[in-house]
Amino acid sequence: MPEPFITSSLRPFGTSIFAVMTGLALEHNAVNLSQGSPDEDGPDFLKNAAARAMHEHPNQYAPFAGVPEFRDAISAWWAKPGGRRADPETEITVTAGCTEAIAAALLGLCEPGDEVILFEPFYDSYRAVIAMAHAVPRFVPLRLEGDGYVFDPDELRAAFTDKTRAIVVNSPHNPTGKIYTDDEMRLIADLCIEHGVTAITDEVYERLVYSADRGRPHRSLASYEGMADRTIAMSSLGKTFSMTGWKIGWTIAPPPLTAAVQAAHQFLIFTVARPLQYGAADAMRDPGCLAWVDNLRDTLRVRRDRLFEVLNHIGFRATLPDAGYFITADHTAVSSPRGIDDDVTLCQRMTTEAGVAAIPVSALCESPGAGRDLVRFSFCKSDPVLDEGIARLERWVEGV
């Protein structure tokens, strides 16, 4: 069979680790704690609103920036974390999930040779899109210290050069669940202003925050002084409402940066499914919307706490996340007795032997050795699925 032709910019990336581990989980009938995909659907009011929209609104192309009703709803939704109401006409673009938003922003902003700063580990599409844009990544590592992840301020300062075009800030962060502190955000803002750099902020877990009561709520970088005019803020509906298959996302940015996003967006997909936009707008205005999200967050918090406790009990050194779907854990104490010294081998054997799939964090890094001691487990699963995954892990670890 002839080798597939893949452009040189994408050839190094192969198949996404999420697809690889999900495929391995299916092959071995494993409990899939690798992918951040809930196995319970979101609220009926969201589905019903979309169904009504199919009958009550046209099912033809939507305006390429998004239907006005949905852009109005997004503006209201973002007002608190963003610190202002964005102009629906000039500052909001509806995208096919946050993944397309990331692509549109980077492809619309970057010239070949421009540098983009990434915190490592990172969501895997960031690195691939930087390659598609023929830009150059610069990495700032997040390191585990105490009960959380931090970066070295001097390493961040050193990453900014006269070629830096953008920095990607994913807070709440995937895979670690970190919410960047106020001091960290202020340093990022100061450096962006000093160097004339655009911030691209991935905020898809903005409503699934568990650490607000510990003084670490989510706040968009765009709300910091001097950042409203230099930030492309992004989020989506999928994580907040457990409807990841809808692929409904958005960007919020001042008009000059929105123009860059839309320049790429119009040729990537042009527009997003019209009925889903109307349905999302109706649902986000529903009085029960925020109560439903609050309940989801409380449910996920309980599942997070349970998985965290079990992982630590059986030998993983887990870190309690501030937000999101995932727990990262140092696997050394579990893998060493099995003669395993890296995360990829551990995840492969855990899937085939224990029947539980997780993500090797080194697949979300580029620096040599980074993430090698860490694996990522997803807890956005139903109680029966999580129960089964936990039981299998306990049996496997105890069986050594």
Image (cartoon, helix red, strand yellow):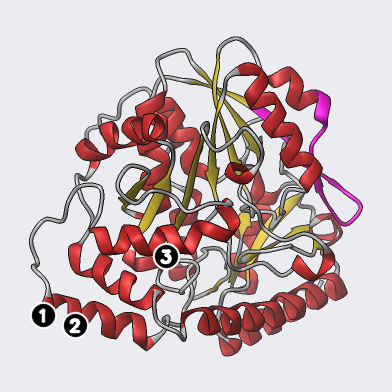
**Figure label count:** 3
Question: Farthest residue toward the top?
Answer: 162
Label 1, residues with CA under 10 Å away: few <14, some 14-19, many ≥20: few
Q: Nearer the viewer, residue 301 or 73?
A: 73
Q: State if disc 2 and disc 1 touch (CB < 8 Å).
A: yes
- The span shown in magenta is 139-154
> Label 3 belongs to which residue?
237
Q: Secondary structure at mark 1?
A: helix
Q: Quadrant of the N terminus?
A: top left
Label 2, residues with CA under 10 Å away: few <14, some 14-19, many ≥20: some
In screen coordinates, is 53 left or right of 123? left
Q: Secondary structure at mark 3?
A: loop
Q: Nearer the viewer, residue 269 or 333?
A: 269
**Residue 228: where, in percent of width, then height?**
54, 38
Q: CA distance from mark 3 to mark 2?
A: 18 Å
Please name the amino acid that badge 1 sits on. Answer: His
Q: Secondary structure at mark 2?
A: helix
Task: Identify the residue at image location x=43%, y=26%.
Answer: 131
Task: Identify the residue at image location x=71%, y=43%.
Answer: 371
Q: Is residue 152 magenta?
A: yes
Q: CA distance from mark 1 to mark 2?
A: 5 Å
> Label 1 belongs to which residue?
55
> Label 2 belongs to which residue?
52
Residue 208 visible here: yes
Please name the amino acid that badge 3 sits on. Answer: Leu
Q: State if disc 1 and disc 3 touch (CB < 8 Å).
A: no
Task: Identify the residue at image location x=25%, y=47%.
Answer: 65
Q: Nearer the viewer, residue 361 or 20?
A: 361
